[in-house]
Amino acid sequence: MLKNPFVPLVFRLITVIFTLTALGLGVRIYRRTDNAPQPCSQRASTYIAVIVDSIAVPYILYVTWDEYTSKPLGLRSATAKMSLLLVDLYFIVFYSSNLSLSFGALTDRRWACYREDHSACLYNEGICSSQRALSGVLIVALLAWMITFSLSVLRVVKRLT
């Protein structure tokens, strides 16, 4: 897996597909929440999904391009490659926090997925199904980020030794 040049590409493509999906779901939840019969406040997972994924998509495309068109590690500064790996780690942290917030939104008594009458926001199946889908997509995207990060670190370590 470490020698095949297409393995990181496959995982980067999986990551970008699920990141785009999470971005779309975040936008859908944002719009449905604004257009709900009883206005509901946005949850942090919606904002983070839209903001982080808007930055993550161009980054993933750049890193994928960089991995296949840049100079090999011996001719390139190791600091440049390590800085890109560090940014991958930052996205893993943001995705982990967004996943936690996304699951929290599903059980929040003040939001659209709570089925009680005294909730601050009426139950809305459309919003809840999108929120459940966002949680699932974030799990897969986070796993893809972690696998990609692990493969990148192992490949760099193998080249440096």
Image: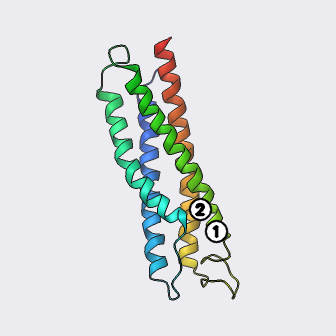
**Which residue position holds label 1?**
106
Which residue position holds label 2? Answer: 102
User: In the rendered view, would you say 57 is above or below 72?
Assistant: below
- Establish if 101 lies above or below 94: below
Left or right, residue 17 beside residue 43: left
Circle 2: is it few (<14), some (14-19), or many (20+) Cα within 10 Å? many
Please determine whether, in this image, residue 161 is positioned above or below residue 118: above
Q: Which residue is drawn at 53% across and 88% down?
A: 38
Judging depth in this view, the residue of 29 and 1 nearest the camera is 29
Residue at 47% in and 14% down: 160
Where residue 124 sits in the image (x, y, percent)? 57, 81
153 sits to left or right of 117: left
Residue found at x 37% / y 13%? 74
Element type where label 2 sits in the image? helix
Three-letter code for the amino acid on which mark 1 is drawn = Leu
Quadrant assignment, res 59 = top left
Q: Position of residue 110 (x, y in %)?
A: 64, 77
Identify the amino acid type marked 2.
Answer: Ser
Task: Give the CA distance from mark 2 to mark 1.
Answer: 7 Å
x and y percent of residue 139 in the render?
58, 52
| Front-most of residues 142 and 121 | 121
Identify the residue shown where x is 40% and y is 26%: 81
- SS class, disc 1: helix
The answer to whether residue 60 is above or below residue 133 is above
The quarter of the picture where residue 123 lies is: bottom right
Residue 43 badge: none
Image coordinates for residue 66, horizontal then vertical, percent: 32, 32
Find residue 106 and report its image quarter: bottom right
Tag 2 near tag 1, CB within 8 Å: yes
